[in-house]
Image (tube, helix red, strand yellow):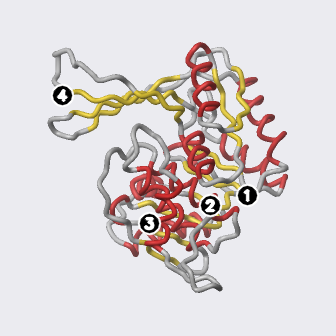
C-alpha cells in the first residue's frame, strides 16, 4: 500500500555538511509487497502485484515492475509515489537509509485498492500484504483486508508493524514480525526464546493469526503455531545489503506454502530466499539457483530416486 522507488548508491564516505559524491544509482521497484512479488516471481510462481501509483514517480514504478516481468494491477492516485534512498559508505561499509513517508491517499483511492484486490483474489492461493500504510490510510486497513479475504476464503499473509499491526484482531493465516516489531507489539522486552514464543502465542490465542513467524536476523527464525514452536538457524554469508531480505523471506515462505510444502520446508525456503537476497545489489531478489542451493543446505532430504530434493 506504500510502494517506493528504491534508489541505491555508494560513496567514498558520508560526512555531515560536506557534499557526498555518489556513484551511478540503481533504481528498483520497492515497497514490501512488490519486493515479495519479485522473490515469488524468481521462484517461478505466478504472482500479481497490486499497488497505488501516482505522478511521474508512479509511472517509473510501473515501468520497473514491468521490467521485472511481474504482472501488476496499479491503482491511480493523485499524489506522487515516494522514493527511498540508500547510500553505502565505502570507507566504513555502513549503510545510510532515508525513507520518505509516501503520498497521502484519499478514502476513494483506498476503496479502489480494496476493490482491485477483491477482483483478483478469488483466483489466488494466497494474498500477501507487506509494508507500512501510507498517510491517510486508517490503522485498521489491513483488518478490512483480512475481513474481505476471510469472506472470499483466501488466506492472508501479513508483514507489517506499529499501529497497523496493533489494529489487526482476526483473520490472518500467517504473520511475520521481526523480534523488534513483536516486542513493540507486546510492550515488553523479549530477550530469549521462551519470551518470544509466549509473545507469538498471544497473537494465536487472541485469534489474530494461525501462524507467527518471528525473524531474528542473524539469530535465525522462530515459527510458532497453536501446537508447538520450532527454531531455524540462519546461514552465515557475506552481506552486501540487508534491504529487502525480510520481504524475500515472506516471498519464499508464501511460494513454499503455495506449492504445498510442510510449514518447516516453506520457512526454510523463506530463509534461503532471504539469505540469497543479502548478496544482491539494491533490493534485487536472489538468483533462483542460489536460492535452491541454500535451501538444499538447510534441508537436504532425499526424494524417491535417492537424489536431494530441491524446490523447482
**Location of the N terminus (image quadrant):** top right
Mark 2 and mark 1 in contact? Answer it, CB < 8 Å.
yes
Label pair 4/2, CB-CB below 8 angstroms: no
179 versus 262 height, above or below: above
> In the image shown, does 3 or 115 lie closer to the viewer?
3
Secondary structure under badge 3? Answer: strand
Q: Which mark is residue 94?
A: none
Instruction: Estimate the spatial distance between the alpha carbons at disc 2 and disc 3, rounded to whole Å.
Output: 14 Å
> Horizontally, is 216 left or right of 172 in the view?
left
Indicate the secondary structure of the residue bearing disc 4: loop
On the rendered image, what quadrant is the C terminus found in?
A: bottom right
Q: Which residue is mark 1?
A: 155
Give whichever of 286, 54 is nearer the camera: 286
Q: Answer left or right for 291 relative to 76.
A: left
Query: Of the residues under marks 4 and 2, which one precedes in the sequence?
Result: 4
Q: Residue at x 46, y 30 (%)?
A: 6
Q: Which residue is mark 3?
A: 221
Mark 2, residue position? 174
Amino acid at each position: 500500500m506504500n510502494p517506493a522507488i528504491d534508489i541505491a548508491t555508494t560513496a567514498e564516505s558520508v560526512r555531515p555538511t560536506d557534499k557526498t559524491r555518489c556513484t551511478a544509482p540503481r533504481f528498483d521497484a520497492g515497497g514490501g509487497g512488490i519486493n515479495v512479488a519479485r522473490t515469488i516471481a524468481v521462484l517461478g510462481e505466478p504472482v500479481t502485484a497490486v499497488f497505488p501509483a501516482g505522478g511521474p514517480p508512479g509511472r517509473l514504478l510501473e515501468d520497473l515492475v514491468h521490467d521485472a516481468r511481474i504482472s501488476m494491477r496499479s491503482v491511480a492516485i493523485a499524489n506522487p509515489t515516494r522514493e527511498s534512498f540508500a547510500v553505502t559508505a565505502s570507507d566504513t561499509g555502513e549503510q545510510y537509509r532515508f525513507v520518505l513517508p509516501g503520498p497521502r491517499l484519499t478514502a476513494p483511492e483506498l476503496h479502489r485498492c480494496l476493490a482491485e484486490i477483491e477482483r483478483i483474489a478469488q483466483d489466488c492461493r494466497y494474498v500477501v500484504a507487506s509494508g507500512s500504510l501510507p498517510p491517510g490510510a486508517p490503522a485498521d486497513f489491513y483488518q478490512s483486508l483480512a475481513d474481505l479475504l476471510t469472506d472470499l476464503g483466501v488466506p492472508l499473509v501479513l508483514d507489517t508493524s506499529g499501529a497497523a499491526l496493533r489494529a489487526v484482531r482476526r483473520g490472518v493465516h500467517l504473520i511475520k514480525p521481526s523480534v523488534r516489531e513483536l516486542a513493540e507489539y507486546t510492550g515488553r522486552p523479549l530477550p530469549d526464546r521462551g519470551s518470544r514464543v509466549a509473545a507469538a502465542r498471544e497473537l494465536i490465542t487472541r485469534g489474530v493469526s494461525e501462524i507467527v513467524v518471528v525473524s531474528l536476523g542473524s539469530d535465525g527464525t522462530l515459527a510458532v503455531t497453536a501446537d508447538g514452536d520450532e527454531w531455524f538457524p540462519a546461514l552465515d554469508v557475506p552481506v552486501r545489503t540487508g534491504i529487502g531480505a525480510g520481504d524475500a523471506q515472506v516471498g519464499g515462505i508464501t511460494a513454499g506454502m503455495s506449492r504445498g510444502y510442510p510449514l518447516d520446508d516453506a520457512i526454510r525456503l523463506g530463509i534461503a530466499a532471504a539469505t540469497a537476497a543479502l548478496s544482491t545489489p539494491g533490493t534485487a531478489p536472489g538468483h533462483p539457483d542460489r536460492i535452491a542451493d541454500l535451501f538444499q543446505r538447510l534441508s537436504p532430504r532425499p526424494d524417491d530416486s535417492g537424489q536431494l530434493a530441491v524446490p523447482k
